[in-house]
Image: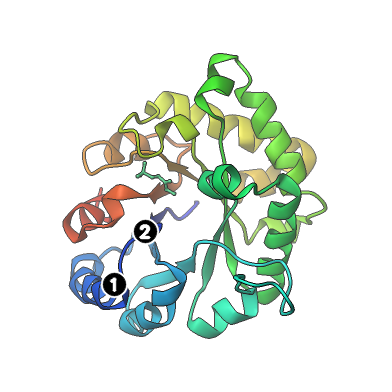
Amino acid sequence: MRRPVIAGNWKMYKKIGEAVEFIAALRPKVAEASHCEVVVAPPFTALQAVAKAAAGSNIQVAAQDVAWEKEGAFTGDVSAPMLCEAGCTHVIIGHSERRQIHGETDERVNRKLKAALEAGLTPIVCVGETLAEREANRTHEILERQFSGGFAALTASDFSRIIIAYEPVWAIGTGRTATPEIAAQSHRYLRSLIAEKIGKSVAEQIRILYGGSVKPDNIQGLMAQEEIDGALVGGASLKRDSFSAIVNYP
Ligand code: 13P
């Protein structure tokens, strides 16, 4: 049984005060949610305050990126041990906005993934094709490339600690959700890659989340797919009522 994960990626929204207020309001709304893990990913500046506000609750905290080195002359970067110190348990790696806006490559994703694992963080690694790639029938090719590069040289035990998020770029922030069947197809393909390259039991255990315009009114259809093990939610995670409705989907 794969335990579902509902994670909210706040992107570059919420100052510290708003973030703390949000957690105080969210806590009672998701306190009974024992069917899934609940994760929120605030901006770096709010991580520590959110971790404190969530202490003792079932809400876990993720960063949205991580450096691959522990420390050094890397202006603007934040390392995995620093994220742990701030109270993070998870970190999002390779989000399409980092790939597109900041030139994140599969090789960098791989280095960041290893740094996160070494520090004891649970990585949530994002993969997904653009609209042009989907329309050119290249979805599998892109997922294969992102998987081979991003997850290179990892062991089966590393995989047991990783969460994958399939986020088709054309569905992010567009209101255009992949149908549950389209999402499940890509999830199945990713799972088949893992089965082939790493092993069948690892592939059966790994959790693959769907991300891209997840809302309270489509979460049930998505979660009805056996292949979909949760959601990485952007816009709808910024409001207490919509995020708690998604968490409480069953
Ligand atoms: P939206 O839910 O706003 O489409 O964003 C998805 C996303 O990028 C989550 O990481």
- Mark closer to the chain start, 1 or 2: 2
Say left or right for 75 vs 51: right
Residue 232 at x, y = what percent?
42, 50
Residue 64 at x, y = what percent?
50, 61
Tell me the SS state at disc 1: helix
Q: Give residue 223's mark.
A: none
Placement of 109 over or under 85, stated as above or below = above
Placement of 104 over or under 111, stated as above or below = above
Task: Please state the total of marks drawn on the protein image.
Answer: 2
Mark 1 and mark 2 residues within 8 Å of each other at the beta carbon: yes
| Callout 2 amino acid | Trp
Q: In which quarter of the image is ligand 1?
A: top left
Taking the spot 40% from the left edge, 28% from the top edge, the residue there is: 178
Residue 213 at x, y = what percent?
34, 38
Mark 2, residue position: 10
Say left or right for 48 vs 128: left
Placement of 221 over or under 27, stated as above or below = above
**In the image, farthest residue toward the right:** 153
Mark 1, residue position: 19
Tell me the SS state at disc 2: loop
